[in-house]
Image (cartoon, rainbow, N blue to C red):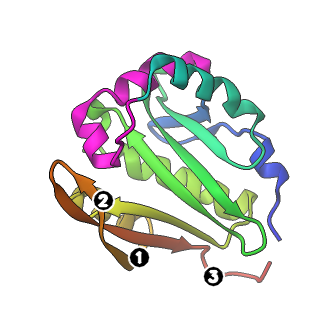
Amino acid sequence: MIDATALAAKPVLEGDRIRLVPLAPRHADAFHATFQDPETRRLTGTHHHWTRAEIGDWTARCADRTDRLDLAVEDRESGAYLGDLALSRIDRDNAHGSLRIALVPAATGRGLGPEAIRLLLDHAFDRVRLHRVQLEVYSYNERARRAYERCGFALEGRLREALYWDGAWHDVLVMAALRPAGPAQ
């Protein structure tokens, strides 16, 4: 049903302002710095404090993974690292997967996240041939929820008080986008 070779082949996807490229060791320092930012950690619900060595190991193994795509978001003009996104948890039998994204603080609020998400969704639906892509967003991240809706994601459910952050419980919203209608595949 899906094209599993599309997960092994790591694409470069070009947008108007950004480029998605395979996440690699050259991104490790910027990737690590992003997750040292308290607001990034809050928006992504990241409790684990990743060491530079862990991030280095992670990025070194990305190219060899055949079950997921890990891509860096780069500025198309300068090549600067703007964040990362991933297509993972691929269910081959049911043609769906999960998406996550994290941008550096300076890249938020500029429409770069939706541009990156649309590029990855197009790849997921057209090349990988997924039928459904889902994500989770925390109830306090209203800006991200609106951006996901602009990209075609719809709210499907709520995991009540599933995240404990900063002394309080927060809901996790489950959203998904479906392949645009067209010929059955």
Q: Is residue 112 left or right of residue 38?
A: right
Q: Residues within 10 Å of mark 3 (few under 14, many from 20)?
A: few
Label 3 vs 1, first from the N-terminus: 1
* The residue stretch that appears in magenta: 25-49
Residue tagged by mark 2?
A: 163
Residue tagged by mark 1?
A: 154
Residue tagged by mark 3?
A: 181
Q: Residue at x 34, y 32 (%)?
A: 104
Q: Picture quarter containing residue 75? A: top left
Q: Is residue 86 left or right of residue 167?
A: right
Q: In this rendering, is residue 165 above or below 19?
A: below
Q: Horizontal and vertical percent for residue 100?
A: 48, 51
Residue 78 appears anywhere in the view: no
Q: In this rendering, is residue 113 above or below 128?
A: above
Q: Where is the N terminus found, in terms of image quarters?
A: bottom right
Q: Nearer the viewer, residue 176 or 174?
A: 174
Instruction: Indicate the amino acid at tag 2.
Output: Leu
Residue 168 appears anywhere in the view: yes
Q: Picture quarter containing residue 147? A: bottom left
Q: Is residue 62 left or right of residue 85?
A: right
Q: Horizontal and vertical percent for residue 144?
A: 30, 56
Magenta-drawn stretch contains 47: yes
Q: Nearer the viewer, residue 31 or 181?
A: 31
Q: Horizontal and vertical percent for residue 165?
A: 22, 51
| SS at mark 2 in the image | strand
